[in-house]
Amino acid sequence: MDETYIQRVIGGDINSFRYFVEKYKDLSYSVARSIIKSDFDAEEAVQDAFINAFRNLHKFERKAKFSTWFYKIVVNESLKRLKKKSLQYIDADNSYADLNQISVELSPIDHLHEEEQKEIINKVLDLLPSTESLLLRLYYLQENNLDEIKIITGFSVSNIKVILFRARKHFTSGLEKSLKNELDSIL
C-alpha cells in the first residue's frame, strides 16, 4: 500500500502524503518521544521528519521498507533536536550478550485493560535512558527486526543486542516498581 502512495506523491499528488502522516504519526511520535523525553520537542521532530520525508521521497531507493526509511529520518531529527538542546544522549558500549536467555514477563499486568497497560508501559519507557527506550519501542512495539533497527539507528547489530539486553532488565525493574507503586496507592 505504501508503494501506491509513494508513486502518487512522486507523481504530483501531494495530498496523498496524508496517508503517510495518518499511518506513521503515532509510532513516529513514540520513537521521537523515547529519544527526546519532551512532548513538544518530539512533536516538532516528527513534523520536521514528515517535511524531510516529503521533500526527499523521490530519493527513497526502496532498499528497505518505507517505515524503516522514515523512522531513520525521525531518529535523526530527534537526535538533532536533542543536540540543539544540549541534552545528554546516552550511547552504549560494544560489549556482547546473549539475548535469548532473558525474557520479560508481563504477567502482573495481564489482567489490566489494554489502555491501562499502554499507560504503564509508556511511563516505564519514559523513565529509561533514551537509547534503551528507543530500541524497545522499535523492536517490540513497532516489530522492527535487528537489521531494520540497524538502518534506523546506525548502531551495529551487536550493539543493538547489548542495549536491548540492558533495556529489558531496566524495563522489568521499572515495571515492577511501577506496579508496586500502583498497588500501594490502591491499598
Image: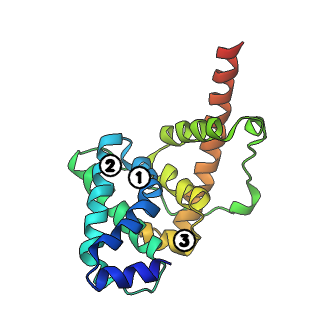
Residue corresponding to mark 2: 43
Crowd tier of the residue under label 3, counting other residues whose Cα lies within 10 Å: few below 14, some 14–19, many 20 or above: some
Residue corresponding to mark 1: 29
Front residue of 49 and 178: 49
Residue corresponding to mark 3: 157
Label 2 secondary element: helix
Three-letter amino acid code at disc 3? Val
Q: Which residue is depicted at the point 50% across and 37% down?
A: 127
Q: Would residue 12 be found to the left or right of residue 72 on screen?
A: left
Quick check: 177 above or below 69?
above
In the rendered image, the quadrant that contains the C terminus is top right
Is the Cβ of the residue at disc 2 closer than 8 Å to that at disc 1?
yes
Q: Position of residue 155 (x, y in %)?
A: 45, 68
Q: Position of residue 105 (x, y in %)?
A: 75, 45
Q: Which residue is depicted at the point 62% across and 55% down?
A: 165
Q: Which residue is depicted at the point 53% across and 36% down?
A: 123
Q: CA distance from mark 3 to mark 1?
A: 24 Å
Three-letter amino acid code at disc 1? Tyr
